[in-house]
Image (cartoon, rainbow, N blue to C red):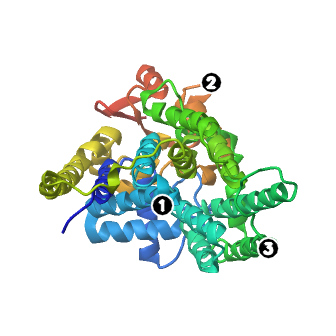
Amino acid sequence: MKFTLRQVFFVVLVLGLFLMTLRPVADPDFWWHLRTGQLIVQNQSIPHTDPFSYTKAGAPWITHEWLSELLIYGIFRLGGYGLLIIIFSIIITSSFMLAYFCSPAESRPYVAGFVLLLGAISTAPTWGVRPQMISLFITSLFLFLLARYRRNGKLKFILPIPVITLVWVNLHAGYFLGLVLIGIFIIGALAELLMAEFHLVEGAGPPPSLKSILIMCGLLGACVIATLANPNGIRIIIYPFQTLTSPSMQQFIQEWFSPDFHLAIWQPLAWLFLALIGFGMLGKKNISPTNILLTLVFGYAALRSMRNIPLFAIAAIPVLSEQIGSLVKIRFADRAPSRLLRLAVPVLMICVVLVVGVRFVQVVREQPTTESKIFPKAAVDWLLENQPKGNLFNSYGWGGYLIWRTYPEYRVYIDGRADVYGDSFIYDYMSIYRAESGWQDKLKNEGIQTVLVEFDSPLANMLLQSSAWHVAFTDKISTIFMR
């Protein structure tokens, strides 16, 4: 089989992107997602109250990711960490490839390919085995389908969207992004219609019809109705707003922080923003109101919170590809491949596939080491072996790991389900963790006999100085104190 340069570039692009996404499981919330999936299978029901902590036992819990958790546990049982890593790498790769195919055909594969790599690298710190990646894929799919409908007006592209919404609302609370996207496309279409009516833009393509706008309004209504098909009922509608307006989550949870551009890992994101601005001014094509809204809305969201950066990237990739493509034309792809190239291509393809395979094996082998470096594996081993009595105080980021390793023998003080605990409780937790005034009384009032925290945390430093506590276990990551 003879490959053209364009085909070779595309295949290497896809495999290279897939290679980049391969990484060990390291998300702190992965573990309680895994345990929740197991709990659903064991009990044949979806939990609606907290089963994992002693501090909020029986408190209402909107299990908005129940279907994702069921999938994660099912994949884990089928193929362990290796299969989970492969599946989520495919999900992440597919998300960006959909953004690539949203780019104009004349910019593919070269311009769009390099823009795709920039967009992907700028989001790399957010990747992992986590339900957010499923939500990213569906967001990208929505953008692809809505863009296709805007381009040719064929109903076949948007008819699946309400059904996808019905599934999405049970996978992740990010379903709300789908409603936002449809709203942006409606507003953008109305703006195009008005601009055409008043001749504000010269040389623009045909504006959308009023009928297509009304169809999208109907689509939005159908999707809102579809969101009600979930085990949490109407509560799922207000859940995204509760999360977005939680001051403790914005203040203490790292993925809700703004990206720190002083760090090297966020420099590609800065380049993406600058390229979008620069080529937006230099490009020869008018940017549609819809694309302007998409980049503004998701650009603001990305600057406000790191977890939103992938959403901005998939919205920006087609826009930046179009603007660079209007200035840069790469035509050597049309040339027939030389004999040397025809001989080299199979070797290149085999090498790329081998590199991906070797990297996958390496990542799977790294999983136990990654677990030991990030999570208190040895400390939890000690807990399970010695079974100390009484309530346990734990670090926020380790609660999920403890749920997976020790539930139901131990219930946690706190874990990554910040919505279950609420702002007031999280502020109290932080006052203990930081060893602020009154921390001793708070530990006593909760009946806490054991403390598991980072060895260099403020609380650990204070407990070392207290005659009421002694060190039962310590290593380079964690320390266990007992009263």
Q: Which mark is residue 101?
A: 1
The kind of secondary structure element at disc 2 is loop
Query: Where residue 440 sits: x, y (%)?
Result: 56, 30
The residue carrying mark 3 is 214
Q: Nearer the viewer, residue 345 or 190?
A: 345
Q: Earlier in the sequence, mark 2 or mark 1?
A: 1
- Give the residue number, with chain letter if any, for mark 2: 437
Residue type, mark 2 in image: Ser
Q: Residues within 10 Å of mark 1 (few under 14, many from 20)?
A: some
Task: Kindly report the distance in space between the C-alpha atoms of the residues bearing marks 3 and 2.
Answer: 59 Å
**Residue 56: percent from the left, percent from the top?**
60, 54
Q: Position of residue 127 (x, y in %)?
A: 42, 49
The secondary structure type at the circle numbered 3 is helix
Count the numbered circles shown: 3
- Tell which circle, 3 or 2, labels the residue nearer the N-terminal end: 3
Task: Mark 3: give few (<14), some (14-19) or many (20+) Cα within 10 Å.
Answer: few
**Can you say which quadrant of the picture contains the C terminus?**
top left
**Which amino acid, by three-letter code, is at mark 1?**
Phe
